[in-house]
Every structure is written in C-alpha cells, then in structure tokens.
Amino acid sequence: MERILVAGGTGLAGRDVVAEALRRGYQVRVLSRNIPTPDQQAFRHGAEYVRADVVSGEGLSQALSGVDVVIDTLDGRTGKARKFLSTGAANLTAAAAGAGVKRAVLLSIVNVDQGPLAYYRAKAAQERAYSDSATNTVIVRAAQFHNLVAGIACAASKARLFISLRGVSFQPIATTDVARALLDVATTAELPDGGMVTVGGPDVIPMREAAEACREHAGGKGRIVTVPVPGSVGRFFREGRMLTPGDPFGTVKFKDWLELQPR
C-alpha cells in the first residue's frame, strides 16, 4: 500500500485531501508545523501526523521516510508567509528527491502566472520551484474555491449587505472536488502532458448570482451592492482569466455547497 504525505494537511484543502486519501485506502501522513488534537476540526482519524518545517527544513527527512507520493497544499496569504512559499517548495521537493519519493503534486491556481496580485506571484514562484525539481512533479491548477466566492459575497452580511463584483464571474470548485483531482493525479500511472492539470467547478456563475444565493441562504433579506474592481486586478477578473470553462472537473455546484454551510 502506498504512503502519501500531505503537506499542509491541516488546512482547508489539505483536510479534504487527507480524508479522500484515507477513503481510497492509502496510508496517510500529514506534515504540519502544528499537530492538531483529535478534538480539533483539522484532525482526521486514521492519519499519521508529523511535525516538520519546510522553510527551515527541520524534520523533513524523518517526515518523508518511507513516503511514495507527496501532495503539497501549503499556502501563504500573509506577506511573511508568501515570501516563504518558494523556499518551502524547493526544500520539500529536494528532500522528497533525496528520500526517493516517486512523485510530488502541488496545488496551485488557474493562470497564476498571469495574475497581478502579490499572492499570485508568490504561488507562481512556488510552481517554478516544483518545475525545477529533480523529482517527478505535477501541478494541479484549480479555480477559486466555493469558500472564497462566498467569503466575498457575504463579507458584509451582518449589515445585510451582499457584495457583487462588477463584471466578474467565477467558476468555483469545492475543496472535496479539488481533493479528488489531486489524488487522481498523484496515483495515476502516467504523468499528464506538460506536468500540469487544470480543474474548475461545474458552472461559470456571475458574481451577482453568487451574491443572490448568499442573500437567500442568509434568509432572503438585505441589499446587493455592486462594487468595481479597479486596475490590473479588475481587468484580470473581468477578462475571465481565472476561469477554465474547458475543464469542468468539479461536480458540486455553488448553491448546493452553500446549502450545506451553517446559516
């Protein structure tokens, strides 16, 4: 039985990767700087948790011992964390190559190399570290998660205001679907052409529609406020460069996902 190491397996996407790998019968080891306790949301029964730091390298060799495949869901949205994404990726893939890991898979974002945001630039640098690695690597670029779209639309919901970004549509995908894509790529016999796979949700939805769904989920009361997104970021979104309509891998629609969330 193969052993899969999930780096960042206590995070939003990582938790679902761990759950999906366990469901498929794999041995799962989770690499994290902070190990969750069994009563915490991040904990998944049946997984092995090890403490390691991809930036300093502390604990990496032990964490990778006996591992066949690495799935990297590590993220860094704050300025300090963003700076270390590429360093962590380089350290993790180098250690994986040294440990004889057969494949390393990175979770990234659709057209991340075209995005004007500092976060996108950091993720693009993380991708380059994987592409330069001595081990076999695959990058899975996913569209925005349902959680992100809902987070934008519901940002002012306590004031009964629901946000729509003018001229912007999303193709949101559930993290459970992203987990399936990562496991498929990690365990298939052949590497994909170009070492990259792109996945999106089942539908492209205007931001207005997402805001309306969030309002309905919150009880149907409130006002939808349409706000512009200026500059190069707005142009990137309005041009639909974060969409991937030719790759509708996801099966969970935004409204169906929303219905499962607490009200």
Image (cartoon, rainbow, N blue to C red):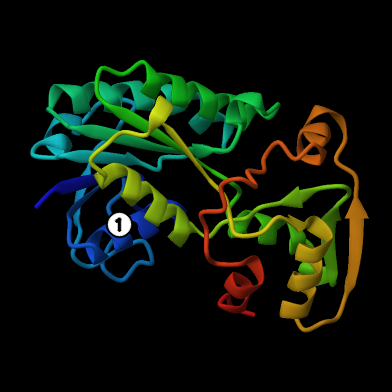
User: Percent x, y for residue 90?
Assistant: 34, 21
From this view, report whether residue 169 is shown above or below residue 63: below
| Tag 1 secondary structure | helix
Give the quarter of the image for residue 259: bottom right
Q: What residue is rendered at 31% in x and 63% in y?
A: 19
- Per the image, the residue denoted by label 1 is 18
From this view, report whether residue 220 is shown above or below residue 83: below
Q: Nearer the viewer, residue 90 or 169?
A: 169
Q: What residue is rendered at 54% in x and 67% in y?
A: 252
Give the quarter of the image for residue 63: top left
Under mark 1, the amino acid is Val
In this rendering, position of residue 231 left or right of residue 152:
right
Q: Looking at this view, name the residue that lies furthest to the bottom.
A: 219
| Residue 84 seen anywhere in this rendered image of the structure | no
Q: What residue is rendered at 49% in x and 32% in y?
A: 81
The quadrant of the image that shows the C terminus is bottom right
| Residue 251 seen anywhere in this rendered image of the structure | yes
From this view, report whether residue 99 is shown above or below residue 47: above
User: Percent x, y for residue 222?
Assistant: 88, 75
In this rendering, position of residue 163 left or right of residue 152:
right
Q: What residue is rendered at 91% in x and 55% in y?
A: 226
